[in-house]
Amino acid sequence: MKGKTAAAIMKAFAEWSNTCKELKPACRSGCDTCCTRNITVTALEGEAILRYVQENDLTGEFALALGKTLSEQPAISGPASTANEFADACLGERDVPDDPEPSTAPCPFLQDNLCTIYPVRPFACRMFISSVVCSGKQPAIVPDFYFEAATCTIQLLEHLDQKEYWGNLYDVLGALAELREFRSIGEIINDQYPGEISKAKMRVRAGKPLPGFLISEENNEKVQGMLDSIFNATVEGRRIEDLLNGK
């Protein structure tokens, strides 16, 4: 049920964003400037990726790419706090630790400028848009209201999967590769890059419950509209808001 709920949350966000006339993305197929290793995910998103890989006979190539990436990971590879930890600190007017310098290295799952796991790409990849074509010299331009709405959605996904792995995409995938379900991937990594799965497990964090949202007054109406779209969507006849509240 959690996996279906996560998929429904991402679908509701996509449908909402498609109705926003202010959004005019310049993003096109083959545009991969934003496809870096600076991506965070929940365990639910990681599990969806690993299942897709196994079901589509991508295990060998994927496992080698993941293992190599894990061997190149810095000691601290993800944010210093989860999205909900950050929101909790801000709402409580507490200082938050600085994040490490984000990696601009290309995602190892790119091939010919295209994503090899596109159908199950994480929300952090799905949400990324820019009104201009990005490049090394031209950063993305994202409307504030959209960024706030996307951040709220990231918080909901973390809340849904609280207490499970949360962190850098590759670390979460590495940690999950130890599970019996993904043994075929884990065995290749352990054989070619011994010790990297254990290191990945030490770098991940645990997802936290939702403490509240960080929404500015000027964007409240638009962001609340997006949240209403998510909360009112249903999964097997149950409202997502009720599922998130454990009802």
Image: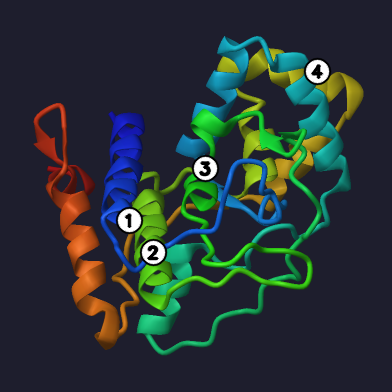
| Distance from the alpha carbon under mark 4 to that under mark 3 | 23 Å
Disc 3 target residue: 122
Q: What whole-number distance in Å separates the C-alpha atoms at marks 1 and 2?
A: 8 Å
Return the residue at label 1.
Answer: 17
Amino acid found under the numbered disc labelled 3 = Pro
Q: What is the crowding at mark 4: few (fewer than 14 residues within 10 Å), some, or many (at least 20)?
A: many
Q: Position of residue 105 (x, y in %)?
A: 81, 54
Q: Check whether the beta carbons of the residues at disc 4 and disc 1 lie within 8 A of each other.
A: no
Residue 64 in picture, x, y percent from top left: 82, 25
Label 3: element kind: loop
Q: Disc 4 marks which amino acid?
A: Ile
Mark 4 or 3 closer to N-term?
3
Give the label, 1 or 3, closer to the camera. Answer: 1
Query: Which of pointers 1 and 2 indicates the residue nearer the eye?
Result: 2
Q: Residues within 10 Å of mark 2 (few under 14, many from 20)?
A: some
> Disc 2 residue type?
Leu
Q: Marks 1 and 3, how far apart in space?
A: 16 Å
Where 182 sits versus 155, above or below?
Answer: above
Q: Are marks 4 and 2 in contact (CB under 8 Å)?
A: no
